[in-house]
Image (cartoon, rainbow, N blue to C red):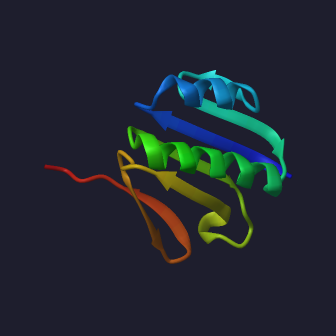
Amino acid sequence: MSMTLIVTRDVEDRYRGFLHSVMLEIAPGVYTSPRMTKAVRERIWDVLSDWHGHLGRGSIIMTWRDAEAPGGQGLLYLGEPSRELVEVDGMVLVRRNVE
C-alpha cells in the first residue's frame, strides 16, 4: 500500500463524485489516499480512463510511491497536463514552455 494522489483539472462533475467515494478531497480537484493498494489504484484508473475516453475534457494525473519508477514515483495522466513531465538521469522533472 502506498500514498496515492490524483489531481483533476477542468473535468466533469462525475469525476468528483466518484473520487469522493474512494479518496479525500484536500483541495479543489486534489484527492489523496494514505494507504491504497495497487489493485484499487488500477481499478480507479480504469474508471477514470474509460470516462475520459468518452468525455475527453480536462486532464487527470495520478501519482504514487513506486520504488522501481524514475524518482521513486509512478505517474499516469490523461489529457494534456499543464506542464510536461520528463525523465532525466533517473528523475522526473517538470518542464514548462516559456513563450
Quarter of the image holding residue 24? top right
- At which x and y percent is residue 80? 36, 50
Whether residue 97 sits left or right of residue 69 in the image: it is: left
Name the quadrant containing residue 95: bottom left
Vertical comparison of 13 with 98: above or below = above
Q: Residue at x 61, y 65 (%)?
A: 71
Q: Residue at x 13, y 49 (%)?
A: 99
On the picture, is 6 further left or further right than 58?
right
Question: Residue 77: x, y in percent?
Answer: 50, 53
Residue 30 against residue 80 in the figure, above or below: above
Q: Residue furthest bottom?
A: 89
Residue 41 at x, y percent in the picture: 74, 50
Q: Is residue 86 left or right of residue 40?
A: left
Q: Is residue 39 left or right of residue 90?
A: right
Residue at the front extreme, as displayed: 54
Place residue 29 in its image quadrant: top right
Total label count?
Answer: 0
Q: Nearer the viewer, residue 26 or 46?
A: 46
Which one is nearer the viewer's eye here, 98 or 64? Answer: 64
Q: What residue do we see at 46% from left, 73% from top?
A: 88
Q: Residue at x 56, y 49 (%)?
A: 50
Q: Position of residue 3 (x, y in %)?
A: 76, 45
